[in-house]
Image (cartoon, helix red, strand yellow):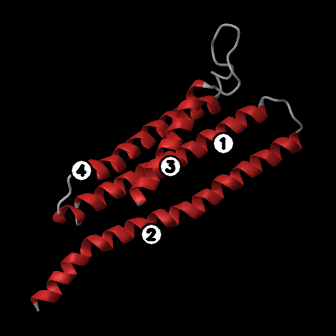
Amino acid sequence: MTAQACSTVAVLIATVVYAAAYTLPGGNNPHGRPMFENSSAFALFTVTDYIAVGCSLTSVVMFLSIFVAPLQLRDFHHTLPRTLKMGFTFLFLSVAATMIAFTSTVFLTIHYMGQRRWFRTFCFSLVSAIVSVFAMIQFPLYISFRETLTNIIKLPKKLLKCVKL
């Protein structure tokens, strides 16, 4: 159930960031080059977009390997939690990279539109708040998930010690 939901989210992220890679912010100039190719925000967008594509597709592969792998009982204690942890890690990285790419796109769009200074400040503040809230909400969830998987791995060892007594 968890792997299925996470793989769905990873596929959606991969679709969005793949489309964003070919729909460049600002479009192209008459010579076919990106409008903002000399901007550091455009470079940040490009790098984080490709990181998001790579991490989300890696996450999809990790979660799909859970479905297709012939797992035995011992695999549920080691292989499955490790694969789930790696898939969730790549999913978290892809979401974070997508948010950074989104932020750089908003920066490019607003900065080069020539809007009033108060409007740009408001938009930058809003986007920064959204990214900060995302990080504050998701990072503790990620840490909790890792700790839970670690405890699940240790649980059979504790049970075996209790049975031997």
Q: Which residue is denoted by mark 2 in the rendering?
A: 144
Q: Which residue is denoted by mark 4 in the rendering?
A: 69
Q: Residue at x 48, y 52 (%)?
A: 92
Q: Secondary structure at mark 1?
A: helix
The x and y percentages for residue 154 are 25, 74
* Relative height, residue 30 to residue 73 (above, below): above
Of marks 1 and 4, the one in the foreground: 4
Q: Residue at x 40, y 46 (%)?
A: 59
Q: Name the amino acid, label 2.
A: Ser
* Relative height, residue 104 to residue 26 (above, below): below
Of marks 3 and 1, the one in the foreground: 3
Q: Secondary structure at mark 4?
A: loop
Disc 3 from disc 1: Cα separation: 20 Å
Q: Name the amino acid, label 1.
A: Thr
Q: Which residue is denoted by mark 3 in the rendering?
A: 9
Callout 2–callout 4 Cβ contact below 8 Å: no
Disc with the residue nearer the chain's start (3 vs 1): 3
Q: Secondary structure at mark 2?
A: helix
Callout 3–callout 1 Cβ contact below 8 Å: no
Disc with the residue nearer the chain's start (2 vs 4): 4
Q: Name the amino acid, label 4.
A: Ala
On the image, which quarter does residue 17 sit in?
top right
Disc 1 from disc 4: Cα separation: 38 Å
On the image, which quarter does residue 111 sit in?
top right
The x and y percentages for residue 82 are 29, 58
Disc with the residue nearer the chain's start (1 vs 2): 1
Q: Which residue is denoted by mark 1 in the rendering?
A: 103
Of marks 2 and 4, the one in the foreground: 4
Disc 3 from disc 4: Cα separation: 21 Å
Q: Name the amino acid, label 3.
A: Val
